[in-house]
């Protein structure tokens, strides 16, 4: 059974810092991994999708890496801003049924 | 391109009442998911459809929850009767069916259910 873990559960940093969020999964039989952002009371916004054959993806100040063999992904946020405050979720799409399995999220607070 | 539409946005009901949620996926997306997200937790898959067939409903509490996707487009999720522990955000998502399974999921805004 695929399990996804995100560490830390919460993170608070001052504005301008670079930071890394971690995601680990137990079964490497995945099609891809997706990082989402969730603002309070809102749905999920897709940030980055990394295919299983890729090592990283970049979008603006965000960079996501994937090491499928070790079951790890990181989301790097450069020059953090207060507007980056949200919960960040990672999800893996497992092979076969294509089910999306989520981690519990990291609640990020950027202090001005 | 229009996104995934869900309604209602909010619902408050008493325990033992029934409630229904509606989802309209992105046009052309054959796969539709319903997730339950309890406060402070990650989303948990309730049911996954491909077209109008069920792919996975292993975590759907079938004694009280039901879902259907008529004609392989819109979907409804029903809870009858509701319990206090059903208070959560119910998220609908859709994705294309792609060769090799490499496809992106898109989520709606969710329905926040409060059972009192």
Image (tube, rainbow, N blue to C red):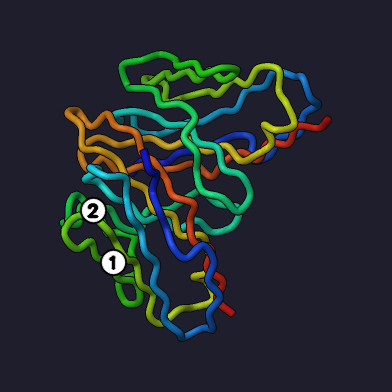
Front position in the image: A3 or A101: A101
- Give whichever of discs 1 and 2 has the lower sequence position: 2
| Quadrant the N terminus of chain A occupies | top left
Mark 1, other Cα within 10 Å: few <14 / some 14–19 / many ≥20: many
Q: Quadrant of residue A112?
A: top right
Residue marked by disc 2? B49
Compared with B41, A30 (above or below) is above
Residues marked 1 and 2 touching at CB (< 8 Å): yes
Relative horizontal placement of residue B93, taking residue A9 as reference (left or right): left
Relative horizontal placement of residue B60, taking residue A67 as reference (left or right): left
Front position in the image: B22 or A22: B22
Relative image position of residue A9 (x, y in whole percent)? 64, 40
Q: In which quarter of the image is residue B34?
A: bottom left
Subunit that carries the residue with mark 2: B
In three-dimensional space, the C-alpha distance between marks 1 and 2, rounded to whole angstroms, equals 10 Å
Relative image position of residue A58 (x, y in whole percent)? 49, 16
Relative image position of residue B98 (x, y in whole percent)? 20, 32
Residues behind callouts 1 and 2 on a single chain? yes
Residue B24 in view (yes/no): yes
Residue marked by disc 1? B67
């Amino acid at each position: 059974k695929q399990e996804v873990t995100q560490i830390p559960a919460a993170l608070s940093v001052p504005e301008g810092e670079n930071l890394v969020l971690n995601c680990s999964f137990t079964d490497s039989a995945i099609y891809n991994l997706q990082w989402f952002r969730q603002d309070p009371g809102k749905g999920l916004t897709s940030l980055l999708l990394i295919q299983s054959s890729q090592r990283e993806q970049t979008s603006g100040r965000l960079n996501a890496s994937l090491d499928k063999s070790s079951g790890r992904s990181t989301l790097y946020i450069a020059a953090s801003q207060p507007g980056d405050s949200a919960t960040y979720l990672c999800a893996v799409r497992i092979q076969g049924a294509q089910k999306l399995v989520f981690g519990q999220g990291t609640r990020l607070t950027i202090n001005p | 391109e229009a996104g995934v539409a869900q309604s209602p946005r909010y619902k408050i009901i008493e325990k033992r009442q029934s409630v229904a949620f509606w989802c309209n996926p992105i046009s052309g997306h054959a796969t539709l998911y319903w997730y339950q997200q309890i406060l402070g937790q990650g989303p948990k898959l309730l049911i996954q459809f491909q077209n109008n067939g069920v792919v996975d409903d292993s975590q759907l509490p079938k004694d009280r929850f039901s879902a259907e996707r008529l004609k392989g487009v819109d979907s409804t999720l029903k809870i009858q009767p509701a319990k206090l522990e059903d208070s959560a955000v119910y998220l609908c998502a859709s994705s294309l069916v792609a060769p090799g399974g490499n496809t992106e999921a898109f989520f709606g805004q969710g329905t926040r259910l409060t059972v009192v």
